[in-house]
Amino acid sequence: MSVPTAELAAPAPPTDVTARTRVLAEWLRGGRLYFTVAGAALVIGALSLLIPSTPSYDPWAWLVWGREIIHVNLQTTGGPSWKPLPMLFTTVFAVFGKAQPDLWLVIARAGAVMSVVMVFKVAWRLTRDLVAGVTGDRLAGVTGERLAIIPPLLAGLIAAGSLVNSGGFISDNALGYSEGLAAALSLIAVDRFLDGARRQAFVVGFFAALDRPELWFFWGPYGLYLFWRDPGARRLVVALFALIPVLWFLPELWGSGHLLRGVNRAQHPRSNSAAFAKCPVCTVFKKEAWPTVLNRVKIPGIIALLVAAVGLWRTRAAWWRRSDVENAVRARAWLLGLGAFGLLWWLGIAFETQAGFSGNNRYLVFGTASVAIAGGVAWGWFSATLGRLIRGLAARRSQASGARGLGLAIPAGTVVAVALFLAVPPWIGKNIISLPRTHHALVYQARLRSDLSAAVAKAGGAHALLGCGSVMTEGFQVPMAAWTLGVHTLRVEATPNTLVGPPWPAVILQTRAQSTSRLLPSPQQIVAWEHAGARYRLIAHVRTFRVFSTCPSKVTS
């Protein structure tokens, strides 16, 4: 039997490298990515407990409330504002007793890891679509597919690195705050929408909206859009719209007797809040929001937004009112939308602070992640554009040299872009977060947790201290003390801001909020109470905590 010549000359099947590249691209689009990354993030979160770890103020209150819910004895008065997202976890974890704080830390830290991964993925995805015409129109085959990954990879690394390097990101999430988890959920919702899974995007966005009420202004209109465009999703939209007020307000009604207790609490920020600055909106935006992302990232990001806006306007006839929009056009629109969202989020938090709400800088992370994505995309887009220019210059010299330079154009453009990124003054090393300083601060906070438990045990146990009477500690340690003693947060008093007279607390848990802070209650305050008739004895001292009591005790320091 003879074989036709046409079959002998047929193209060879795709190489293994090409097949693997396509399989990888398909895998990155599926929901399997989220489960795989979530599993890895949980492992990282669990391993992080090998270093000294502890929750901070708000997380300790969530832990107290979770324990109270399973005992059907919720009291939210005296703690921070209620938020449902962390409570979904802390309530379940309360059944594990003393492991509850560590279990929540694993979730919070895993959420932060997920947010970094999702910032990388969204920046990588948008850049890939933006530069597809630059890297894919003349480069073909295995080499072309390999080189096309370089600009999106650069974009993802810069964006993810910018988020990790942003002020407070590592410390806040290490201490168990929930904003990293909520940011990850928000970006997963964006990614699912880009994949065409609009109902899934709405559901994931629902969980993000359980952490920050400001997200309602974006999730709510999207739900109305979904209700209009997808009749099959209408029951889902109505159900989740109904659940939002139930989960946000009814627990406050149960725990405090007031539906809007959380809103009122948010208007009584801590003493170190920017709400007490001369110009809160200026302080939050200029001193807290703007510095979270390096100028070499956010300035190119803003320039990229302008370029994307101009490009969309000039090509509006090709995409306006059309359902089939090119990936590059859609990428420009999403780049513009995410970048604008980030800047508007920063401004929104600043104006909320001006209105008297708590202006904690950890609320800025949603805007920071979006601005970081815009900046990363800008550098990836720029490197691909440089590659195209280098390729054009090589092609002008001669057709042969141009062909040889084709494969080096994209790497050369990336090298130039990275050199410019590093060379922009001031030197980048001065703007990188100090890991030793961050580690020292986190270790001190972890010592507060272990030392308090040891001090309470040394002083005779929670029952003995509570039996003595009222308990007071430094203000930021109130929820931790309440959890350790097994009582409501209102059972533990915070140190007064100024010297006061009687009545005085029966038990004092004296400590410092930070290693450089002053002791609270201050020695002067204790002396003032003693002059008024109190008789304090130091009954326990464990490194960062001193326990004073006015009651007779067999325990001595």
Image: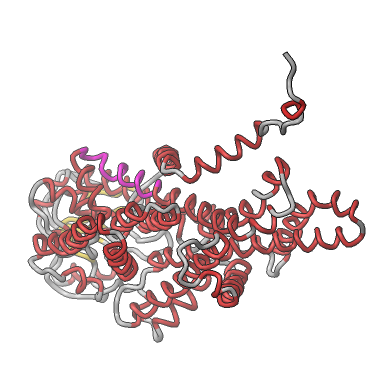
- The image quadrant that residue 222 belongs to is bottom left
Q: Quadrant of the N terminus?
A: top right
Query: Does residue 106 belong to the magenta stretch?
Result: yes
Query: Does the image show residue 523?
Result: no
Q: Position of residue 510 (x, y in %)?
A: 28, 59
At a point 59% along the width and 62% down the height, the residue shown is: 377
| Apparent side of residue 220 relative to residue 97 in the rendered image (left or right) | right
Viewer-closest of 414 and 312 = 312
- Residue 348 falls left or right of residue 228: right
Q: State whether residue 495 appears in this view.
A: yes
Location of residue 336 in the rendering, given as x and y in whole percent from the top left corner? 51, 70
Would residue 112 be found to the left or right of residue 494 on screen?
Answer: right
- Front residue of 268/140: it is 140
Find the magenta span and give its range: 96-110
Q: Quadrant of residue 205?
A: bottom left
Magenta span includes 281: no
Measured as percent of width and height from the top left, residue 3 is found at 73, 20
Q: Is residue 321 above or below residue 164?
A: below
Question: Residue 376: x and y, percent?
Answer: 59, 61
Of residues 71 and 241, the one nearer the viewer is 241
